[in-house]
Amino acid sequence: MATLAEPIVHGKPVVSQLKTNTLNLFDATIIATSSVAPAYSLAATIAVLFVTVGAASPAAILVSFVPVFFIALAYFYLNRMDPNCGASYSWVSRTLSPYIGWFGGWVQLCANILFCAAAPLIAGAYTLQLLNSFGWISSDAASSTVWIAIVGVLWLFLVTYMVVKGIRLTANFQWVLLAIEYLVVVGFCVAAFIKVIGGHPAAQPVHLHWFNPFALGSVSGLAAGAALGVFFFWGWDTAANVNEETKDAERTPGYAGLISMVVLLVLFLFSATAIDMVTSPANLNNLGNSGGDILYFFAQSLSTAPITYLMILAVLSSTVATVQTTLLPSSRLSFSMSRDGVFPGIFGIVHKSWQTPWVGTLITTALSTLVIASTFIGSVNAQFGNLILEIGVLVAFYYGITGVACAWAFRKVLLTSPKLFFLAGLFPFIGGLFLFWVGVQVVFPNYEVDSGTITTAAPVLITFALGIPLTIVAAVLNKNGFFRQKTVSYVSRNGNLVAAVAGGGTMELTGGPTGGPPPAAPPVADPAAQSRSSNE
């Protein structure tokens, strides 16, 4: 009989090889929030966001929050039924289509590798900037792309060691990094509001149009702003990828994702508003076009050195945190795909003592290092700015299919409960469709309008183009029937949500009373129903 923490593989519960029952709700929420890396997201993205939507950046954040929060609801409900560290890949495969699930997993892996290649460069740049601020290295050394790449790779190796060594060490390190960035960023934002309240001539009061979605302008402006906003919030789903290592695995990751989304919304709106208040539109626009660091410029408008160096430290700690928490879902996702027999077996190797997929983690790091070695020429900030929209589109895709899969999986019970209808059906479906629309609006105008160029959309199109034949290859090489498994939908039986296999059989999974919280103990499986399911 399945326990509440056992993932479902090919319709059967399996005992996880990872270190189970390790993270509590606080740990999972810290990891989810750190994965988004608020200070890093603001430093790297707010400039591009301002160039795209002007002072309406708070509106873009609000617009993008809604569909992503709807996807967080999808993660909550799907994780309740199947706490599998493959998360979106696993749930889409079981409920929608194994082919779509594998393709979505591929897209997520590509987004993670792109990010793990870009983010260490930012960490390297901020490390050297901090050392230069103290006068320990020259300005030439601080701006050297070679040294930025070397230091970035060293940071990547350090966090890789922690991810490989164990989930507990990783979680503890995240506490420290998140505390640093939150204290510093919130502190400077409070200082900005004090400056406005004090009537400083260089500051301006809050304007309501900053929060008006209609201030985003055209449809393309809305789509680009939403795509940037999706990147802002990307990462909270890491809590779902470590579900097999979490206490109360079917509930805690979902709650952690929802809590982190609300916390992040408050911080992002607070920060974007504070920046608008004390930074002139001309400076914001110039910094955005040049790839400058608006967050550090924001700190300089409020204080002087060495206090402003704290902002560099905050962004550095945030960057290192998000590199580490991007490796986490990547290694867990590839582990889950390998466990299903649809990815190379080497990714499924788990260290006997550390209980982590250490080989897969090292491979992800190696691939990211190769990308760094081949692309670190030119301006680091400018290069990362080019990747923001691309990664946002990839994230919008796999978030979108998860939302649609959730609505489809619960379609047979949506009318049994208003809570299920809205939270597991309508909202995830709307969120998924909106994110698909964002991706199309961002990708295709770059191809059709800009003189036929596909520069901005190239990584997205390449990822999708490679994903189709690779999905076919995975299906051909698969020997254990993953791609031939029948999908399931969730139905109500005796007050519990259970998985109904296509063809009529049902099989008990984790989950609780329809529309309510899961029970304290696992539901009793129906051997006859399980037998029917396995025979179909």
Image (cartoon, helix red, strand yellow):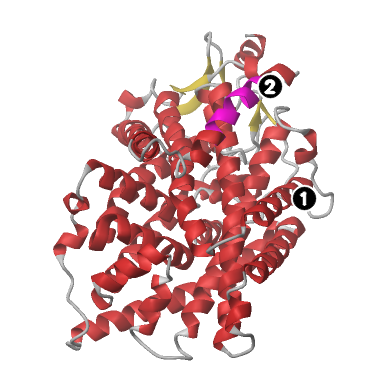
Quadrant of image for the N terminus: top right
Q: Position of residue 330 (x, y in %)?
A: 63, 46
Q: Residues within 10 Å of mark 1 (few under 14, many from 20)?
A: many
State the residue at coordinates (65%, 49%): 245
Q: Give the CA separation, mark 2 to mark 1.
A: 25 Å
Q: Mark 2: which secondary structure?
A: helix
Q: Nearer the viewer, residue 29 or 210?
A: 210
Query: Where, by quadrant of the figure, is residue 203 drawn?
Result: bottom left
Q: Amino acid at mark 1?
A: Trp
- Which residues, given as a range, are shown in magenta? 463-473
Query: Where, by quadrant of the figure, is residue 427 drawn?
Result: top left
Main SS of residues in magenta: helix
Would you say residue 467 sits in the magenta stretch? yes
300 to 340, vertically: above or below? below
Quadrant of image for the C terminus: top right
Q: Nearer the viewer, residue 78 or 152?
A: 152
Q: Amino acid at mark 2?
A: Val
Which residue is disc 2 drawn over? 473
Which residue is disc 1 drawn over? 358
